[in-house]
Image (tube, helix red, strand yellow):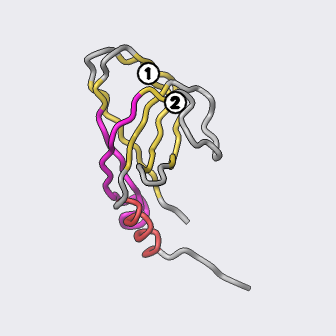
Amino acid sequence: MVSKYVVNRAIKEIATMLSGLSWEIAIGSGRTPAWVDNETLENELLRKDASVSLVTTDVTNDTLEFYTKFIITESISVSEYGVFKKAPNPWMYCRIVTDPIDLHAGLEFPVKIRIQITR
């Protein structure tokens, strides 16, 4: 019998390495369900730099918490969110699709997304 497991320290180190990169959060109005092969939002509306911090879910510092605040300049309906690694070699790390939220000009719209590194 072979027993393999990713140890707790490795989970923390992977999250720590990822937290050192530059990230953005994008919001959009797409409604197609999220899928593992998604590389972009379906209909991106806004994108902004995101801060990232480490928080604990199950293992110390196993979760990346991304945060930004959008200033809405025109009325929009938001139903999808994405976390993107910035250049060089930009790519989308995750996509979330929700029920639409109608936002009006002048609103501040904070977005916080947590991604847990797991076994």
Q: Residue 70, located in which quarter of the rendered image?
A: top left
Residue span colored magenta: 46-69
Q: Residue at x 42, y 51 (%)?
A: 87
Q: Residues within 10 Å of mark 1 (few under 14, many from 20)?
A: few
The foreground one among 119 and 17 is 17
Looking at the rendered structure, the secondary structure element under dot 2 is strand
Q: 76 above or below 31? A: above
| Quadrant in the picture for the C terminus | bottom right
Image height check: is 105 above or below 8? above
Q: Main secondary structure of the magenta part?
A: strand
Q: Furthest residue to the front?
A: 88
Q: Residue furthest bottom?
A: 1
- Location of mark 2 (residue): 98
Q: Residue at x 34, y 57 (%)?
A: 55
Relative placement, left or right, of 115 versus 112 is right
Residue 33: % across, % down: 62, 33
* Disc 2 and disc 1 in contact, CB within 8 angstroms: yes
Amino acid under label 2?
A: Thr
Give 36 or 84, whichever is nearer the viewer: 84
Given the image, on which type of amino acid does mark 1 rest?
Answer: Ile
Quick check: is 60 in the magenta stretch? yes
